[in-house]
Amino acid sequence: MSHVKELQQWYALHCEGGWEHGSGIRIETIDNPGWLIRIDLAGTELQSEDFDPIVTTTNDAGWADIRIRDGVWQAACDPVGLDAAIGTFLEWARGFRRPR
């Protein structure tokens, strides 16, 4: 399954009562250049879970800074790192699946 499709499913699973009205997922470009992904964790099964920050400096594999800040999982990454960043979130989130 593609990372985007799985992220869509994660989002849809959490749109069941109000989370989506004040929270959500934002993906935007930044001027480094690169991407910024923000996923609100409040009101989800992930809100109290630990995430070890990942910081990769510029090299052949690109760069990324992924961490939780103020209840928001966020990843800033290089222009070709979007899929990998989404995959990092999904791999972490799979460990805490919300019951259907």
Image: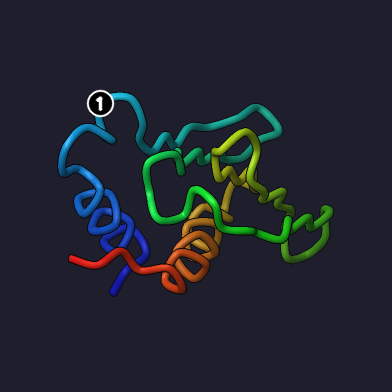
Which is nearer the eye, 58 or 97? 97
Question: In the rendered view, would you say 79 is above or below 52?
Answer: above
Circle 1 sits in a helix, a strand or a loop, which is it? Answer: helix
Q: Quadrant of the C terminus?
A: bottom left
Which is nearer the eye, 51 or 80? 51
Residue 10 sits in quarter: bottom left
How are the residues colored?
rainbow
Residue drawn at (60%, 30%) of the image: 30
Residue 76 appears left or right of 90: right
The three-letter code of the residue at mark 1 reads: His
Residue pointed to by mark 1: 21
Residue 68 appears left or right of 43: right
Q: Name the spot of residue 44 as percent of width and height, x first.
A: 38, 48
Q: Name the spot of residue 4 as percent of width and height, x first.
A: 33, 58
Residue drawn at (57%, 54%) of the image: 80
Residue 38 appears left or right of 14: right
Question: In the rendered view, would you say 23 is above or below 14?
Answer: above
Residue 49 sits in quarter: bottom right
Residue drawn at (44%, 37%) of the image: 27
Please identify the residue farthest to the front as the structure is shown: 48
Q: Name the spot of residue 32 as percent of width and height, x first.
A: 71, 33
Q: Name the spot of residue 6 as percent of width and height, x first.
A: 30, 64
Which is nearer the eye, 74 or 81? 74
Q: How many marks?
A: 1
Crowdedness near tag 1: few (<14), some (14–19) or many (≥20) residues, C-alpha within 10 Å: few
Residue drawn at (73%, 56%) of the image: 53
Question: In the rendered view, would you say 88 is above or below 33?
Answer: below
Q: Quadrant of the N terminus?
A: bottom left
